[in-house]
Image (cartoon, helix red, strand yellow):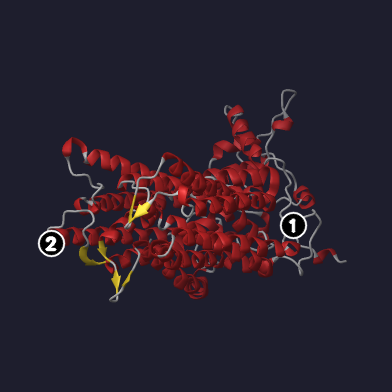
Amino acid sequence: MEPKEYTQDGTVDLRGQPVLAAKTGKWKACAFLVGYEAFERMAFYGIAANLVVYLTTQLHEDTVSSVTNVNNWSGSVWITPVIGAYVADSYLGRFWTFTISSLIYVIGMLLLTMAVSVKFLKPTCANGVCNKATPFQIAFFYTSIYLIAVGAGGTKPNISTFGADQFDDFNPHEKKLKVSFFNWWMFSSFTGALFATLGLVYIQENLSWGLGYGIPTVGLMLSLVIFYIGTPIYRHKARRTGHPTSDLYRVFAGAFTNRKLILPIRPSELHEFDQQYYITTGKRRIHHSAVFRFLDKAAIKQEGKDSKPRALCTVTEVEEAKLVLGMTMIWLVTLIPSTIWAQINTLFVKQGITLDRHFGSNFQLPAASLGSFVTLSMLVFVPMYDRYFVLLMRKKTGNPRGITLLQRLGIGFVIQILAIAIASAVEVKRIHVIRVHQIQRPDEIVPMSIFYLLPQYVLLGIADVFNAIGMLEFFYDQSPEEMQSLGTTFFTSGIGVGNFLNSFLVTMVDKTTGRNGGKSWIGKNVNDSHLDYYYGFLLILSALNLVAFIGASKKYIYKREAVDIEEKCVQMESKPLDLSPLQV
Protein backbone atom coordinates (compact mmCIF):
# COMPACT_ATOMS: atom_id res chain seq x y z
CA MET A 1 0.00 0.00 0.00
CA GLU A 2 1.37 3.42 -0.94
CA PRO A 3 2.09 5.61 2.11
CA LYS A 4 0.52 8.58 0.39
CA GLU A 5 -2.87 6.85 0.58
CA TYR A 6 -2.91 7.33 4.34
CA THR A 7 -3.92 10.59 5.98
CA GLN A 8 -1.05 13.05 6.22
CA ASP A 9 -1.94 14.52 9.62
CA GLY A 10 -1.24 11.29 11.51
CA THR A 11 -4.85 10.43 12.38
CA VAL A 12 -5.57 6.81 13.32
CA ASP A 13 -8.51 4.46 13.79
CA LEU A 14 -9.94 3.40 17.15
CA ARG A 15 -7.22 0.74 17.50
CA GLY A 16 -4.44 3.25 16.87
CA GLN A 17 -3.66 2.14 13.32
CA PRO A 18 -3.10 4.61 10.41
CA VAL A 19 -6.23 5.21 8.34
CA LEU A 20 -6.75 5.39 4.59
CA ALA A 21 -7.64 8.88 3.40
CA ALA A 22 -10.09 7.68 0.75
CA LYS A 23 -12.15 5.44 3.05
CA THR A 24 -12.38 7.52 6.19
CA GLY A 25 -13.26 10.97 7.47
CA LYS A 26 -14.54 13.99 5.54
CA TRP A 27 -18.27 14.65 5.22
CA LYS A 28 -19.21 10.97 4.99
CA ALA A 29 -17.96 10.53 8.56
CA CYS A 30 -19.53 13.78 9.74
CA ALA A 31 -22.91 12.58 8.45
CA PHE A 32 -23.04 10.20 11.44
CA LEU A 33 -22.20 13.03 13.84
CA VAL A 34 -24.65 15.74 12.82
CA GLY A 35 -27.65 13.66 13.85
CA TYR A 36 -26.42 13.57 17.43
CA GLU A 37 -25.80 17.32 17.43
CA ALA A 38 -29.34 18.00 16.18
CA PHE A 39 -30.98 15.78 18.82
CA GLU A 40 -28.70 17.02 21.62
CA ARG A 41 -29.53 20.63 20.82
CA MET A 42 -33.20 19.69 20.63
CA ALA A 43 -32.91 18.24 24.15
CA PHE A 44 -30.99 21.22 25.52
CA TYR A 45 -33.24 23.90 24.04
CA GLY A 46 -36.31 21.83 24.89
CA ILE A 47 -35.27 22.39 28.50
CA ALA A 48 -33.64 25.84 28.34
CA ALA A 49 -36.29 27.59 26.23
CA ASN A 50 -39.12 26.86 28.64
CA LEU A 51 -37.33 26.25 31.95
CA VAL A 52 -38.23 29.68 33.31
CA VAL A 53 -41.90 28.92 32.62
CA TYR A 54 -41.72 25.54 34.38
CA LEU A 55 -39.99 27.06 37.40
CA THR A 56 -42.56 29.84 37.77
CA THR A 57 -45.75 27.92 36.92
CA GLN A 58 -44.96 24.46 38.35
CA LEU A 59 -42.41 25.11 41.12
CA HIS A 60 -43.76 28.61 41.95
CA GLU A 61 -40.43 30.45 41.88
CA ASP A 62 -40.47 34.26 41.56
CA THR A 63 -39.03 36.14 38.57
CA VAL A 64 -35.57 36.87 39.97
CA SER A 65 -35.16 33.35 41.43
CA SER A 66 -36.30 31.63 38.23
CA VAL A 67 -34.09 33.80 36.01
CA THR A 68 -31.14 33.20 38.35
CA ASN A 69 -31.69 29.43 38.40
CA VAL A 70 -32.05 29.24 34.62
CA ASN A 71 -28.85 31.24 34.17
CA ASN A 72 -26.98 29.13 36.74
CA TRP A 73 -28.03 25.90 35.06
CA SER A 74 -27.27 27.19 31.56
CA GLY A 75 -23.96 28.49 32.83
CA SER A 76 -23.12 25.06 34.22
CA VAL A 77 -23.97 23.39 30.91
CA TRP A 78 -21.49 25.67 29.15
CA ILE A 79 -18.80 25.66 31.89
CA THR A 80 -18.49 21.89 32.52
CA PRO A 81 -16.98 21.36 29.02
CA VAL A 82 -13.72 22.74 30.46
CA ILE A 83 -13.45 19.56 32.56
CA GLY A 84 -14.61 17.31 29.72
CA ALA A 85 -12.09 18.81 27.32
CA TYR A 86 -9.25 18.44 29.82
CA VAL A 87 -10.09 14.77 30.35
CA ALA A 88 -10.22 14.21 26.58
CA ASP A 89 -6.95 16.00 25.80
CA SER A 90 -5.01 14.54 28.72
CA TYR A 91 -6.44 11.07 29.34
CA LEU A 92 -9.26 9.40 27.41
CA GLY A 93 -9.33 11.10 24.01
CA ARG A 94 -12.39 12.68 22.42
CA PHE A 95 -14.20 9.46 21.43
CA TRP A 96 -14.19 7.74 24.84
CA THR A 97 -14.83 10.94 26.79
CA PHE A 98 -17.85 11.55 24.57
CA THR A 99 -19.03 7.95 25.03
CA ILE A 100 -19.02 8.06 28.83
CA SER A 101 -20.50 11.56 28.99
CA SER A 102 -23.32 10.80 26.56
CA LEU A 103 -24.43 7.98 28.88
CA ILE A 104 -24.60 10.45 31.81
CA TYR A 105 -26.53 12.87 29.57
CA VAL A 106 -29.13 10.22 28.70
CA ILE A 107 -29.53 9.22 32.37
CA GLY A 108 -30.16 12.88 33.21
CA MET A 109 -32.81 13.15 30.49
CA LEU A 110 -34.53 9.98 31.72
CA LEU A 111 -34.63 11.31 35.29
CA LEU A 112 -35.94 14.69 34.10
CA THR A 113 -38.73 12.98 32.16
CA MET A 114 -39.61 11.07 35.33
CA ALA A 115 -39.48 14.27 37.42
CA VAL A 116 -42.23 15.90 35.35
CA SER A 117 -44.25 12.72 34.69
CA VAL A 118 -44.31 10.44 37.75
CA LYS A 119 -47.04 11.54 40.14
CA PHE A 120 -45.10 11.52 43.43
CA LEU A 121 -42.09 13.29 41.80
CA LYS A 122 -43.99 16.38 40.62
CA PRO A 123 -46.23 18.97 42.33
CA THR A 124 -49.91 18.09 42.41
CA CYS A 125 -52.16 20.36 40.34
CA ALA A 126 -55.88 21.10 40.30
CA ASN A 127 -57.75 23.36 37.85
CA GLY A 128 -54.46 24.51 36.33
CA VAL A 129 -53.02 25.61 39.69
CA CYS A 130 -50.10 23.61 41.10
CA ASN A 131 -49.23 23.21 44.76
CA LYS A 132 -45.79 24.12 46.05
CA ALA A 133 -43.23 21.43 45.32
CA THR A 134 -41.82 19.42 48.21
CA PRO A 135 -38.07 19.61 49.02
CA PHE A 136 -37.65 16.06 47.65
CA GLN A 137 -39.39 16.95 44.38
CA ILE A 138 -37.24 20.06 43.99
CA ALA A 139 -34.06 18.10 44.77
CA PHE A 140 -34.95 15.35 42.27
CA PHE A 141 -35.73 17.88 39.53
CA TYR A 142 -32.51 19.85 39.99
CA THR A 143 -30.44 16.65 40.28
CA SER A 144 -31.72 15.54 36.88
CA ILE A 145 -30.96 18.79 35.08
CA TYR A 146 -27.51 19.10 36.66
CA LEU A 147 -26.72 15.53 35.61
CA ILE A 148 -27.47 16.76 32.09
CA ALA A 149 -25.00 19.61 32.68
CA VAL A 150 -22.32 17.07 33.68
CA GLY A 151 -23.03 14.97 30.59
CA ALA A 152 -22.88 18.03 28.36
CA GLY A 153 -19.46 18.76 29.83
CA GLY A 154 -17.99 15.74 28.09
CA THR A 155 -20.05 15.77 24.90
CA LYS A 156 -20.16 19.43 23.89
CA PRO A 157 -16.43 20.19 23.50
CA ASN A 158 -15.55 16.83 21.99
CA ILE A 159 -18.23 16.12 19.39
CA SER A 160 -17.66 19.28 17.33
CA THR A 161 -13.88 18.96 17.65
CA PHE A 162 -14.11 15.29 16.73
CA GLY A 163 -16.04 16.33 13.62
CA ALA A 164 -13.34 18.84 12.66
CA ASP A 165 -10.74 16.08 13.12
CA GLN A 166 -12.28 14.27 10.15
CA PHE A 167 -10.58 16.75 7.79
CA ASP A 168 -6.84 16.59 7.07
CA ASP A 169 -5.19 20.02 7.31
CA PHE A 170 -2.24 18.73 5.28
CA ASN A 171 -4.53 17.89 2.36
CA PRO A 172 -5.41 21.14 0.47
CA HIS A 173 -8.77 19.76 -0.72
CA GLU A 174 -9.84 18.61 2.74
CA LYS A 175 -8.62 21.84 4.34
CA LYS A 176 -10.87 23.75 1.95
CA LEU A 177 -13.83 21.53 2.92
CA LYS A 178 -13.10 22.22 6.57
CA VAL A 179 -13.69 25.96 6.04
CA SER A 180 -17.42 25.20 5.71
CA PHE A 181 -17.55 22.54 8.42
CA PHE A 182 -18.43 24.77 11.37
CA ASN A 183 -21.09 26.62 9.37
CA TRP A 184 -22.92 23.40 8.53
CA TRP A 185 -22.25 21.86 11.92
CA MET A 186 -24.04 24.75 13.55
CA PHE A 187 -26.76 24.47 10.90
CA SER A 188 -27.59 20.99 12.25
CA SER A 189 -27.51 22.43 15.77
CA PHE A 190 -29.97 25.15 14.78
CA THR A 191 -32.28 22.55 13.24
CA GLY A 192 -32.56 20.76 16.57
CA ALA A 193 -33.09 24.04 18.38
CA LEU A 194 -35.85 25.01 15.94
CA PHE A 195 -37.82 21.83 16.58
CA ALA A 196 -37.45 22.41 20.33
CA THR A 197 -38.68 26.00 20.32
CA LEU A 198 -41.51 25.34 17.87
CA GLY A 199 -42.67 21.82 18.72
CA LEU A 200 -41.45 20.78 22.16
CA VAL A 201 -42.36 24.04 23.87
CA TYR A 202 -45.94 23.78 22.58
CA ILE A 203 -46.18 20.13 23.65
CA GLN A 204 -44.89 20.98 27.13
CA GLU A 205 -47.36 23.79 27.76
CA ASN A 206 -50.43 22.32 26.05
CA LEU A 207 -50.11 18.52 26.18
CA SER A 208 -47.62 17.18 28.69
CA TRP A 209 -44.28 18.19 30.17
CA GLY A 210 -43.37 14.50 30.27
CA LEU A 211 -44.02 14.06 26.55
CA GLY A 212 -42.12 17.28 25.84
CA TYR A 213 -39.01 15.90 27.55
CA GLY A 214 -39.54 12.26 26.56
CA ILE A 215 -39.38 12.92 22.80
CA PRO A 216 -35.83 14.39 22.83
CA THR A 217 -34.75 11.63 25.25
CA VAL A 218 -35.73 8.94 22.75
CA GLY A 219 -34.21 10.98 19.91
CA LEU A 220 -30.95 11.33 21.81
CA MET A 221 -30.67 7.57 22.33
CA LEU A 222 -31.45 6.95 18.64
CA SER A 223 -28.79 9.44 17.53
CA LEU A 224 -26.18 7.67 19.67
CA VAL A 225 -26.95 4.39 17.89
CA ILE A 226 -26.40 6.16 14.55
CA PHE A 227 -23.17 7.72 15.87
CA TYR A 228 -21.65 4.35 16.74
CA ILE A 229 -22.63 2.84 13.38
CA GLY A 230 -20.11 5.24 11.83
CA THR A 231 -17.22 4.08 14.08
CA PRO A 232 -15.27 2.20 11.34
CA ILE A 233 -14.80 5.35 9.23
CA TYR A 234 -13.90 7.82 11.97
CA ARG A 235 -10.47 9.40 12.24
CA HIS A 236 -8.93 9.92 15.67
CA LYS A 237 -6.17 12.36 16.59
CA ALA A 238 -3.28 10.44 18.14
CA ARG A 239 -2.10 11.98 21.43
CA ARG A 240 1.61 12.78 21.23
CA THR A 241 1.97 14.21 24.74
CA GLY A 242 0.65 12.86 28.02
CA HIS A 243 -0.71 16.10 29.45
CA PRO A 244 -0.74 19.01 26.96
CA THR A 245 -1.46 21.57 29.67
CA SER A 246 1.78 20.64 31.45
CA ASP A 247 3.72 22.33 28.65
CA LEU A 248 1.88 25.56 29.46
CA TYR A 249 2.92 25.34 33.09
CA ARG A 250 6.52 24.71 32.03
CA VAL A 251 6.52 27.82 29.83
CA PHE A 252 5.17 30.13 32.53
CA ALA A 253 7.44 28.60 35.16
CA GLY A 254 10.45 28.88 32.83
CA ALA A 255 9.67 32.49 31.95
CA PHE A 256 9.42 33.34 35.65
CA THR A 257 12.66 31.51 36.49
CA ASN A 258 14.53 33.31 33.68
CA ARG A 259 12.85 36.66 34.27
CA LYS A 260 16.16 38.41 34.97
CA LEU A 261 17.85 37.14 31.80
CA ILE A 262 18.17 39.37 28.73
CA LEU A 263 16.33 38.26 25.62
CA PRO A 264 18.48 37.76 22.50
CA ILE A 265 17.89 40.24 19.69
CA ARG A 266 17.27 37.53 17.11
CA PRO A 267 14.49 34.96 17.76
CA SER A 268 16.61 32.36 15.93
CA GLU A 269 18.90 32.30 18.98
CA LEU A 270 16.08 30.88 21.13
CA HIS A 271 15.83 27.14 21.69
CA GLU A 272 13.95 25.22 19.00
CA PHE A 273 14.14 21.76 17.42
CA ASP A 274 14.98 21.49 13.73
CA GLN A 275 12.30 20.84 11.14
CA GLN A 276 13.26 17.15 10.89
CA TYR A 277 12.13 16.64 14.51
CA TYR A 278 8.64 17.89 13.68
CA ILE A 279 8.48 15.79 10.51
CA THR A 280 9.49 12.68 12.49
CA THR A 281 7.14 13.24 15.43
CA GLY A 282 4.22 14.54 13.38
CA LYS A 283 3.87 17.61 15.62
CA ARG A 284 3.32 21.02 14.07
CA ARG A 285 5.93 23.71 14.39
CA ILE A 286 4.68 27.19 15.25
CA HIS A 287 6.80 30.14 14.21
CA HIS A 288 7.90 32.94 16.50
CA SER A 289 5.66 35.98 17.03
CA ALA A 290 6.46 39.35 18.59
CA VAL A 291 3.63 39.36 21.17
CA PHE A 292 3.99 38.48 24.87
CA ARG A 293 7.79 38.64 24.56
CA PHE A 294 8.26 37.99 28.28
CA LEU A 295 7.36 34.32 27.64
CA ASP A 296 10.29 34.02 25.21
CA LYS A 297 12.56 33.91 28.26
CA ALA A 298 11.44 30.31 28.82
CA ALA A 299 13.32 29.37 25.61
CA ILE A 300 16.61 31.22 26.31
CA LYS A 301 19.60 28.95 25.84
CA GLN A 302 21.92 29.00 28.84
CA GLU A 303 25.61 28.25 28.73
CA GLY A 304 27.59 26.66 31.52
CA LYS A 305 27.30 23.94 34.14
CA ASP A 306 24.30 25.46 35.87
CA SER A 307 22.05 25.20 32.84
CA LYS A 308 19.08 22.87 33.02
CA PRO A 309 18.39 21.66 29.47
CA ARG A 310 15.52 19.43 30.53
CA ALA A 311 13.54 22.45 31.69
CA LEU A 312 14.25 24.40 28.52
CA CYS A 313 11.17 25.15 26.40
CA THR A 314 11.09 25.33 22.62
CA VAL A 315 9.85 28.30 20.60
CA THR A 316 6.84 26.19 19.55
CA GLU A 317 5.93 25.49 23.18
CA VAL A 318 6.29 29.17 24.02
CA GLU A 319 4.11 30.11 21.05
CA GLU A 320 1.45 27.67 22.22
CA ALA A 321 1.38 29.47 25.56
CA LYS A 322 1.13 32.79 23.71
CA LEU A 323 -1.84 31.43 21.76
CA VAL A 324 -3.63 30.55 25.00
CA LEU A 325 -2.94 34.03 26.39
CA GLY A 326 -4.16 35.65 23.17
CA MET A 327 -7.33 33.56 23.14
CA THR A 328 -7.92 34.47 26.79
CA MET A 329 -7.73 38.14 25.80
CA ILE A 330 -10.38 37.60 23.11
CA TRP A 331 -12.43 35.36 25.44
CA LEU A 332 -12.79 38.17 27.97
CA VAL A 333 -14.48 40.43 25.41
CA THR A 334 -17.00 37.71 24.46
CA LEU A 335 -18.55 37.63 27.95
CA ILE A 336 -20.86 40.64 27.57
CA PRO A 337 -22.21 39.37 24.19
CA SER A 338 -22.89 36.02 25.91
CA THR A 339 -24.82 37.93 28.58
CA ILE A 340 -27.00 39.46 25.85
CA TRP A 341 -27.62 35.99 24.44
CA ALA A 342 -28.79 34.83 27.90
CA GLN A 343 -31.83 37.14 27.66
CA ILE A 344 -33.44 34.92 24.99
CA ASN A 345 -34.46 32.20 27.45
CA THR A 346 -35.07 34.45 30.47
CA LEU A 347 -36.31 38.04 30.39
CA PHE A 348 -37.46 37.92 26.76
CA VAL A 349 -39.71 35.00 27.73
CA LYS A 350 -40.99 36.84 30.81
CA GLN A 351 -41.86 39.79 28.54
CA GLY A 352 -43.63 37.53 26.08
CA ILE A 353 -45.83 35.94 28.73
CA THR A 354 -47.39 39.34 29.48
CA LEU A 355 -48.24 40.10 25.82
CA ASP A 356 -51.09 39.05 23.54
CA ARG A 357 -49.91 35.70 22.15
CA HIS A 358 -52.91 34.84 19.99
CA PHE A 359 -52.14 33.73 16.46
CA GLY A 360 -55.46 33.50 14.71
CA SER A 361 -58.70 33.07 16.61
CA ASN A 362 -57.94 29.89 18.60
CA PHE A 363 -54.21 29.28 18.70
CA GLN A 364 -52.07 30.86 21.45
CA LEU A 365 -48.33 30.93 20.86
CA PRO A 366 -46.16 29.80 23.82
CA ALA A 367 -43.92 32.71 24.81
CA ALA A 368 -40.76 30.58 24.55
CA SER A 369 -41.65 29.62 20.96
CA LEU A 370 -40.67 33.07 19.76
CA GLY A 371 -37.11 31.87 20.28
CA SER A 372 -37.64 29.76 17.16
CA PHE A 373 -37.20 32.94 15.13
CA VAL A 374 -33.62 33.14 16.40
CA THR A 375 -33.10 29.68 14.97
CA LEU A 376 -35.04 30.35 11.76
CA SER A 377 -33.01 33.43 10.98
CA MET A 378 -29.83 31.43 11.57
CA LEU A 379 -31.02 28.61 9.32
CA VAL A 380 -31.74 31.13 6.56
CA PHE A 381 -28.54 33.12 6.90
CA VAL A 382 -26.01 30.29 7.39
CA PRO A 383 -26.38 29.04 3.77
CA MET A 384 -26.40 32.64 2.54
CA TYR A 385 -23.25 33.36 4.51
CA ASP A 386 -21.47 30.21 3.34
CA ARG A 387 -22.55 30.28 -0.32
CA TYR A 388 -22.70 33.99 -1.09
CA PHE A 389 -21.08 36.23 1.52
CA VAL A 390 -17.90 34.15 1.78
CA LEU A 391 -17.51 33.91 -2.01
CA LEU A 392 -18.08 37.65 -2.45
CA MET A 393 -15.62 38.65 0.27
CA ARG A 394 -13.08 36.02 -0.85
CA LYS A 395 -12.80 37.82 -4.19
CA LYS A 396 -12.18 41.14 -2.45
CA THR A 397 -9.84 40.00 0.33
CA GLY A 398 -8.19 36.84 -0.97
CA ASN A 399 -8.93 35.18 2.37
CA PRO A 400 -10.36 31.61 2.01
CA ARG A 401 -12.83 32.48 4.80
CA GLY A 402 -13.88 35.70 3.09
CA ILE A 403 -13.09 37.78 6.18
CA THR A 404 -10.85 37.06 9.15
CA LEU A 405 -12.23 35.23 12.14
CA LEU A 406 -12.14 38.32 14.34
CA GLN A 407 -13.84 40.49 11.73
CA ARG A 408 -16.64 37.95 11.74
CA LEU A 409 -16.99 38.30 15.51
CA GLY A 410 -16.96 42.08 15.31
CA ILE A 411 -19.81 42.19 12.81
CA GLY A 412 -21.87 39.88 15.04
CA PHE A 413 -21.27 42.07 18.08
CA VAL A 414 -22.45 45.17 16.23
CA ILE A 415 -25.68 43.44 15.14
CA GLN A 416 -26.18 42.29 18.73
CA ILE A 417 -25.93 45.87 19.99
CA LEU A 418 -28.64 46.86 17.52
CA ALA A 419 -30.83 44.00 18.79
CA ILE A 420 -30.60 45.03 22.45
CA ALA A 421 -31.29 48.66 21.49
CA ILE A 422 -34.50 47.55 19.75
CA ALA A 423 -35.40 45.37 22.77
CA SER A 424 -35.14 48.44 25.01
CA ALA A 425 -37.31 50.50 22.64
CA VAL A 426 -39.99 47.80 22.49
CA GLU A 427 -40.03 47.59 26.28
CA VAL A 428 -40.56 51.36 26.45
CA LYS A 429 -43.64 50.90 24.26
CA ARG A 430 -44.89 47.99 26.40
CA ILE A 431 -44.63 50.12 29.53
CA HIS A 432 -46.47 52.93 27.77
CA VAL A 433 -49.34 50.56 26.87
CA ILE A 434 -49.43 49.33 30.48
CA ARG A 435 -49.81 52.89 31.76
CA VAL A 436 -52.47 53.81 29.20
CA HIS A 437 -54.58 50.77 30.14
CA GLN A 438 -53.72 51.06 33.86
CA ILE A 439 -52.55 47.46 34.12
CA GLN A 440 -51.25 46.50 37.57
CA ARG A 441 -51.56 42.76 38.22
CA PRO A 442 -48.73 40.47 37.00
CA ASP A 443 -51.18 38.07 35.35
CA GLU A 444 -52.93 40.75 33.28
CA ILE A 445 -52.30 40.55 29.54
CA VAL A 446 -50.96 43.69 27.92
CA PRO A 447 -52.99 44.53 24.76
CA MET A 448 -49.91 44.47 22.55
CA SER A 449 -48.90 41.69 20.15
CA ILE A 450 -46.01 39.44 21.13
CA PHE A 451 -44.70 39.87 17.58
CA TYR A 452 -43.38 43.29 18.60
CA LEU A 453 -40.54 41.24 20.09
CA LEU A 454 -39.82 39.58 16.75
CA PRO A 455 -37.11 42.01 15.47
CA GLN A 456 -34.88 41.51 18.50
CA TYR A 457 -35.08 37.72 18.12
CA VAL A 458 -34.32 37.82 14.39
CA LEU A 459 -31.38 40.19 14.82
CA LEU A 460 -29.88 38.02 17.55
CA GLY A 461 -30.18 35.04 15.20
CA ILE A 462 -28.34 36.90 12.44
CA ALA A 463 -25.72 38.04 14.96
CA ASP A 464 -25.13 34.42 15.98
CA VAL A 465 -24.34 33.48 12.37
CA PHE A 466 -21.35 35.77 12.75
CA ASN A 467 -20.31 35.57 16.40
CA ALA A 468 -21.51 32.16 17.67
CA ILE A 469 -20.14 30.17 14.74
CA GLY A 470 -17.21 32.54 14.48
CA MET A 471 -16.24 32.00 18.13
CA LEU A 472 -16.43 28.21 17.82
CA GLU A 473 -14.24 28.24 14.71
CA PHE A 474 -11.83 30.84 16.12
CA PHE A 475 -11.09 29.00 19.35
CA TYR A 476 -10.72 25.65 17.57
CA ASP A 477 -8.53 27.08 14.81
CA GLN A 478 -6.25 29.09 17.09
CA SER A 479 -5.75 26.43 19.77
CA PRO A 480 -2.48 24.50 20.06
CA GLU A 481 -2.82 21.23 18.16
CA GLU A 482 -2.76 19.01 21.26
CA MET A 483 -5.32 21.19 23.08
CA GLN A 484 -8.10 21.66 20.55
CA SER A 485 -10.81 20.14 22.74
CA LEU A 486 -9.74 22.38 25.60
CA GLY A 487 -9.46 25.29 23.18
CA THR A 488 -13.04 24.79 22.06
CA THR A 489 -14.13 25.28 25.67
CA PHE A 490 -13.12 28.91 25.37
CA PHE A 491 -16.31 29.11 23.31
CA THR A 492 -18.52 27.11 25.67
CA SER A 493 -17.13 28.61 28.88
CA GLY A 494 -17.64 32.12 27.51
CA ILE A 495 -21.35 31.38 27.13
CA GLY A 496 -21.38 29.79 30.58
CA VAL A 497 -19.70 32.72 32.29
CA GLY A 498 -22.03 35.03 30.36
CA ASN A 499 -25.00 33.25 31.92
CA PHE A 500 -23.49 33.49 35.39
CA LEU A 501 -22.70 37.14 34.75
CA ASN A 502 -26.31 37.77 33.74
CA SER A 503 -27.48 36.00 36.89
CA PHE A 504 -25.19 38.24 38.95
CA LEU A 505 -26.34 41.40 37.14
CA VAL A 506 -30.03 40.54 37.53
CA THR A 507 -29.60 39.91 41.26
CA MET A 508 -27.51 43.04 41.86
CA VAL A 509 -29.76 45.30 39.79
CA ASP A 510 -32.84 43.96 41.59
CA LYS A 511 -31.30 44.55 45.03
CA THR A 512 -29.85 47.95 44.15
CA THR A 513 -32.90 49.44 42.44
CA GLY A 514 -35.35 47.95 44.94
CA ARG A 515 -33.47 49.30 47.95
CA ASN A 516 -35.30 51.52 50.46
CA GLY A 517 -38.70 50.74 48.99
CA GLY A 518 -37.77 51.77 45.44
CA LYS A 519 -39.24 50.15 42.33
CA SER A 520 -36.99 47.32 41.16
CA TRP A 521 -36.10 47.26 37.47
CA ILE A 522 -36.64 43.47 37.56
CA GLY A 523 -39.39 42.92 40.11
CA LYS A 524 -41.72 39.97 40.71
CA ASN A 525 -44.37 41.84 38.73
CA VAL A 526 -42.94 42.37 35.24
CA ASN A 527 -45.86 44.71 34.50
CA ASP A 528 -44.65 47.01 37.25
CA SER A 529 -40.91 46.92 36.53
CA HIS A 530 -38.42 48.75 34.32
CA LEU A 531 -36.86 46.16 32.01
CA ASP A 532 -36.23 49.02 29.58
CA TYR A 533 -33.72 50.47 32.05
CA TYR A 534 -32.01 47.09 32.41
CA TYR A 535 -31.81 46.68 28.63
CA GLY A 536 -30.41 50.20 28.39
CA PHE A 537 -27.78 49.22 30.95
CA LEU A 538 -26.86 46.17 28.84
CA LEU A 539 -26.70 48.42 25.76
CA ILE A 540 -24.10 50.65 27.41
CA LEU A 541 -22.08 47.62 28.53
CA SER A 542 -22.21 46.19 24.99
CA ALA A 543 -21.00 49.43 23.42
CA LEU A 544 -18.07 49.67 25.86
CA ASN A 545 -17.29 46.01 25.24
CA LEU A 546 -17.17 46.59 21.48
CA VAL A 547 -14.49 49.24 22.00
CA ALA A 548 -12.52 46.77 24.13
CA PHE A 549 -12.98 44.05 21.47
CA ILE A 550 -11.59 46.29 18.74
CA GLY A 551 -8.56 47.08 20.90
CA ALA A 552 -7.93 43.41 21.70
CA SER A 553 -8.40 42.39 18.06
CA LYS A 554 -5.85 44.86 16.78
CA LYS A 555 -3.24 43.38 19.10
CA TYR A 556 -4.04 39.75 18.33
CA ILE A 557 -1.60 37.80 16.14
CA TYR A 558 -2.96 34.72 14.37
CA LYS A 559 -1.26 31.34 14.68
CA ARG A 560 1.49 30.70 12.13
CA GLU A 561 2.19 27.02 11.53
CA ALA A 562 4.66 25.52 9.09
CA VAL A 563 1.78 24.12 7.04
CA ASP A 564 0.35 27.63 6.66
CA ILE A 565 3.63 28.96 5.35
CA GLU A 566 3.94 26.15 2.82
CA GLU A 567 0.49 27.00 1.49
CA LYS A 568 1.28 30.74 1.50
CA CYS A 569 -1.63 31.54 3.78
CA VAL A 570 0.32 33.61 6.27
CA GLN A 571 -0.44 36.90 4.58
CA MET A 572 -4.14 36.37 5.21
CA GLU A 573 -4.24 35.11 8.81
CA SER A 574 -0.99 36.07 10.57
CA LYS A 575 -1.57 39.76 11.03
CA PRO A 576 -3.61 41.85 13.46
CA LEU A 577 -7.27 42.36 12.68
CA ASP A 578 -7.83 45.03 10.07
CA LEU A 579 -11.24 46.52 10.77
CA SER A 580 -11.13 49.41 8.37
CA PRO A 581 -12.45 47.70 5.20
CA LEU A 582 -15.65 46.66 6.98
CA GLN A 583 -16.03 49.74 9.13
CA VAL A 584 -16.73 47.60 12.19
Reading the image, the residue beneath label 1 is 11
- In terms of secondary structure, where does tag 1 sit? loop
Are the residues tagged 2 and 1 within 8 Å (C-beta)?
no
Q: Name the quarter where the N terminus is drawn.
A: bottom right
Q: 195 or 130, which lies in front?
A: 130
Q: Is residue 212 left or right of residue 298?
A: left
Q: Position of residue 551 (x, y in %)?
A: 41, 49
Quarter assignment of residue 516 = top left
| Outermost residue to the top | 306
| On screen, residue 13 above or below 500 | below
Q: Is residue 36 left or right of residue 510?
A: right
Reading the image, the residue beneath label 2 is 437
Q: Nearer the viewer, mark 2 or mark 1?
A: 2
- For the residues labelled 2 and 1, the Cα–Cα distance comes to 66 Å
Q: 538 or 176, which lies in front?
A: 538
Q: Is residue 471 visible?
A: yes
The type of residue carrying mark 1 is Thr
Q: 387 or 221, which lies in front?
A: 221
Q: Position of residue 25 (x, y in %)?
A: 71, 65
Q: Position of residue 12 (x, y in %)?
A: 77, 57
Quarter assignment of residue 464 = bottom left
